[in-house]
Image (spheres, grey):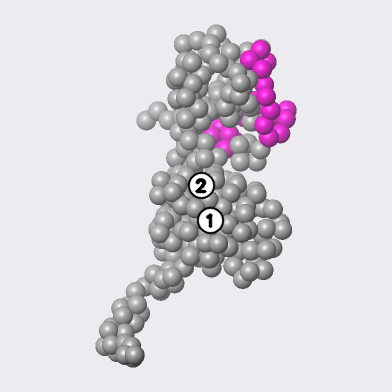
Amino acid sequence: MRDFRPNRRLVLAGAMALLALPGGARAQAGRRVVCAGADVTEIVADLAGAGVIQGVDTTSHIPPEVRNLPSIGYLRQISAEGILSLKPDLLIANRDLGPPNAIEQIRGAGVRIEIVDFPLNGEGMAAKVRHIGSILEREKQADTLAGTVAAAMTDLARRLDGVASRPRVGFIRGIDGGTPIAGGRMGLVDATYALAGGSNAFGDFTLFKPVSREVLAAAPPDFIVADGGSVESAGGAASFIDQLGLTSAFAGHQERLVAADLATLFAFGPSGAREITALARRLHPDRFVG
């Protein structure tokens, strides 16, 4: 049998080429990352490229390339076996990662787990970017991205400074069998409304609850936030408003229905600054003149 003898000149050339790369790029060579949380996935892709990501949870949709990656399940109910089958060396997740036994199983298999938990505000969004940049050894890229996010949120806070009223905003997840499903008190939702200059119209319950058309019509929110896909599936804004029983309340004011990418709006990733600002423009258009 013929012995295989590597070409020493080629090996040395490859090694020198690798050493010539910036430190962060060398650190990415061979790295296999799994992401859990829409915010985390977007940041990792922005800083290191979607190519390092081996799998994502079901909340992750940005950038579009990650939608075709293997799924590790819902953020709060991840599959340890599914993650380990991807052979990652790093799992980066936000604070909602669970369940605990799955986390311990993954950690016990030798996978490094980084849980990202920062305040739900502009400063926290920028700090989150920098922290993930440190994990990935992409500090320079993270500083640039964090600066963009911080500038956007600072400008938003300046525009909304001293707002006298905070419109009541209702989150409708969808319509199930003709009954609207409303989103109540949730940290991400409440924080989003606060930053956009609004308040939660459904603050008297937590998580999700069916709310009848009659109840909505009797005390209509000032604005409705709904997933753009749900609005489109319903036949457009007018049809969706009618299915909520708000045709009379919103007559002549279809702009009070805000069709958004909820996975972005409530995720507090880099795109969140843009989506929160877009919501603020609807709630306080006078603050965005000029």
- Can residue 166 be seen by looking at this rendering? no
Q: Residue furthest front?
A: 1
Residue closest to the eye, 163 or 246: 246
Residue ID at (40%, 28%) = 289
The amino acid beneath tag 1 is: Cys
Q: Are marks 2 and 1 in contact (CB under 8 Å)?
A: yes
Q: Which residue is mark 2?
A: 60
- Can residue 223 be seen by looking at this rendering? yes
Residue closest to the eye, 1 or 190: 1
Tell me which corner region of the image, top left, top right, bottom left or bottom right, holds residue 2.
Answer: bottom left
* Residue 39 pos. (x, y %): 52, 49
Q: Quadrant of the C terminus?
A: top left
Q: Is residue 104 above or below residue 4?
A: above
> Element at badge 1?
strand
Q: Residue furthest top?
A: 248
Tell me which corner region of the image, top left, top right, bottom left or bottom right, holds residue 236.
Answer: top left
> Element at badge 2?
loop
* Residue 56 pos. (x, y %): 52, 52
Q: Which residue is mark 1?
A: 35
* Residue 11 pos. (x, y %): 31, 85
Q: Residue furthest left?
A: 9
Is residue 183 shown in magenta? no
Residue ID at (57%, 20%) = 222
Q: Is residue 96 left or right of residue 29?
A: right
Q: Is residue 286 above or below residue 25?
A: above
Region of the chain picked out in magenta, as a range: 192-215
Lower sequence index among marks 2 and 1: 1
* Residue 90 pos. (x, y %): 54, 65
Q: Quadrant of the N terminus?
A: bottom left
